Image: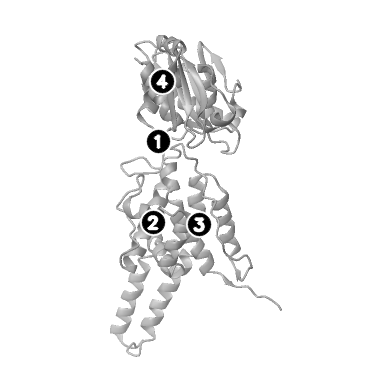
């Protein structure tokens, strides 16, 4: 099923700038230090590797980071209670262990078998994945056994053992129920770990060299939403907090445009309230405007978003620079990538006509918002928590930049007394 060479290849990918040498039946792992002397990270005995290989049976399979056979499942999970809580809090703890009716469930440090399968399968084929904590091996941890290696990776896994046979899909349903019960009873949230997305979803802690003197007075309600977006670690919360800033003005900008259109029509010198033809045309004008409004008085959100952008984000070049200040690659990303969890072509090119740029921004923002808010089953694409967090994180610079422009451009001068 596995070989020593598979494992060594995968482990080399995990460590990055490293090479290994075989000496006295041990693999010695050495870090390249550039101009300085190389340093030994650790060693793993070939006999230990072979002993682990012999524990696998033909029934064991490793699929999508799940180690599975008919009576056992183990999979890596990630803690979402708070990204800043140290991992060590969950090591060697039994608070989630349960044994009933011959079944056992637990969350603990990954088993040697799981880590071996992960390294020999996934990390053998993927050399560009950053493993949290693994860099600490270079500073204060030495690997002298496979047990040391397992601890060094600091991977948490769920272990399920069953007295009867289950299919892989059945195990995944059981796993889901177990993780939900932990969340329900203990307020801890765990999700199946995706090693393709090891980047944490903190919002970028950007620093700007602007002034701190309060020359402008900002809307306090918008500021509260902004604080929520900036301080949150969850991209879902970030996005909706910033979107609330956009929709704050939807009603007023739509009404203003409607009132201006009516005023412009009835104040023309050619208009007369005594001519039936003029009254009929005025009625058509009102009817067309009111199509954008629902029975409850709320205006069409998609159109309101476009009006809001044009009113409060008047300088598209400034918006582009703001996006770049948050994430320098985002402008190119929006031009070359659609939103994978949202419907429609939502590419944004900042190098076309002004109206097209506004329309493209509206389409992308609205598509993301709908995908987040609407979770109905069906053929339409939709955002799924954790699964799409990496992709949603990439949408934050755009929505944050728009929110900042709206806060700034809707502000009033601060009345300072001298």
Foreground label between 1 and 3: 1
Above or below, 336 relative to 101? below
**Nearer to us in this view, 51 or 255:** 51
Disc 1 versus disc 3: distance between alpha carbons?
37 Å
Dot 4: within a 10 Å radius of its alpha carbon, few (fewer than 14), some, or many (20 or more) residues? many
Apparent side of residue 149 relative to residue 165 in the rendered image (left or right) = right
Residue for badge 2 = 331
Q: Earlier in the sequence, mark 1 or mark 4?
A: 4
Label 2 – label 1 distance at C-alpha: 24 Å
Mark 2 or 3, which is nearer the eye? 2
Q: Is residue 405 above or below residue 206?
A: below
Return the x and y of residue 368 as percentages of the image width and height: 40, 51
**Residue 244 tag number:** 3
Q: Nearer the viewer, mark 3 or mark 4?
A: 4
Tag in front: 2 or 1:
1
- Residue at disc 4, secondary structure: helix
Give the residue number, with chain letter if any, for mark 4: 117
Q: Tell me if mark 3 has few (under 14), some (14-19) or many (20+) residues whose alpha carbon lies within 10 angstroms of its own.
A: some
Residue 342 position (above or below residue 322): above
Mark earlier in primary sequence (1, 3): 1
Q: Secondary structure at mark 2?
A: helix
Question: Which mark lies nearer to you, 1 or 4?
Answer: 1
Q: Residue at x 44, y 42 (%)?
A: 389
Residue at which label 1 appears: 128
Marks 2 and 3 close (CB-CB < 8 Å): no
Residue 295 image offset from top left, x and y in percent: 41, 61
Which is more N-terminal, label 4 or label 2? 4
Real-space CA distance between mark 1 and mark 4, rounded to the nearest whole angstrom = 18 Å
Q: CA distance from mark 2 to mark 4?
A: 39 Å
């Amino acid at each position: 099923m596995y070989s020593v060479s598979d494992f060594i290849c995968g482990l080399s990918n995990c460590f990055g700038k490293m090479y290994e040498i075989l000496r006295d039946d041990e693999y010695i792992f050495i870090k390249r230090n550039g101009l300085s002397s190389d340093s030994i990270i650790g060693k793993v005995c070939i006999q230990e590797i072979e002993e682990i290989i012999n524990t696998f049976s033909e029934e064991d399979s490793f699929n999508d980071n799940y180690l599975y056979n008919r009576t056992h499942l183990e999979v890596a999970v990630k803690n979402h209670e708070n990204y800043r809580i140290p991992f060590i809090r969950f090591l060697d703890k039994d608070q989630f262990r349960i044994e009933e009716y011959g079944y056992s469930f637990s969350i603990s440090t990954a088993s040697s078998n799981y880590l071996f399968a992960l390294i020999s399968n996934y990390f053998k084929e993927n050399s560009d994945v950053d493993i949290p904590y693994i860099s600490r091996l270079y500073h204060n941890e030495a690997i002298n056994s496979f047990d040391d290696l397992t601890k060094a990776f600091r991977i948490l896994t769920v272990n399920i053992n069953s007295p009867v046979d289950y299919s892989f899909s059945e195990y995944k349903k059981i796993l889901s129920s177990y993780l939900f019960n932990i969340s329900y009873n203990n307020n801890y949230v765990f999700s199946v770990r995706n090693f393709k997305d090891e980047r944490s979803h903190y919002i970028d802690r950007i620093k700007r060299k602007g002034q701190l003197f309060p020359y402008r007075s900002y809307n306090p309600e918008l500021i509260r939403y902004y604080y929520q977006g900036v301080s949150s670690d969850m991209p879902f919360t970030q996005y909706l907090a910033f979107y609330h800033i956009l929709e704050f003005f939807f009603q007023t900008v739509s009404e203003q445009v409607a009132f201006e259109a009516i005023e412009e029509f009835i104040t023309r010198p050619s208009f007369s309230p005594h001519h039936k033809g003029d009254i009929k045309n005025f009625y058509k004008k009102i009817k067309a405007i009111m199509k954008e409004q629902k029975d409850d008085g709320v205006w069409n959100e998609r159109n309101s978003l476009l009006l809001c952008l044009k009113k409060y984000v008047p300088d598209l070049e400034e918006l582009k620079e703001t996006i770049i200040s948050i994430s320098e690659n985002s402008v190119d990303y929006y031009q070359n990538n659609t939103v994978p969890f949202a419907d429609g072509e939502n590419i944004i090119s900042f190098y076309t006509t002004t109206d097209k740029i506004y329309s493209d921004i509206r389409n992308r923002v609205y598509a993301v918002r709908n995908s987040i808010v609407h979770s109905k089953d069906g053929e339409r694409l939709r955002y799924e928590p954790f699964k799409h967090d990496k992709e949603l994180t990439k949408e934050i610079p755009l929505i944050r930049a728009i929110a900042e422009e709206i806060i700034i451009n809707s502000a009033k001068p601060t009345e300072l007394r001298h």
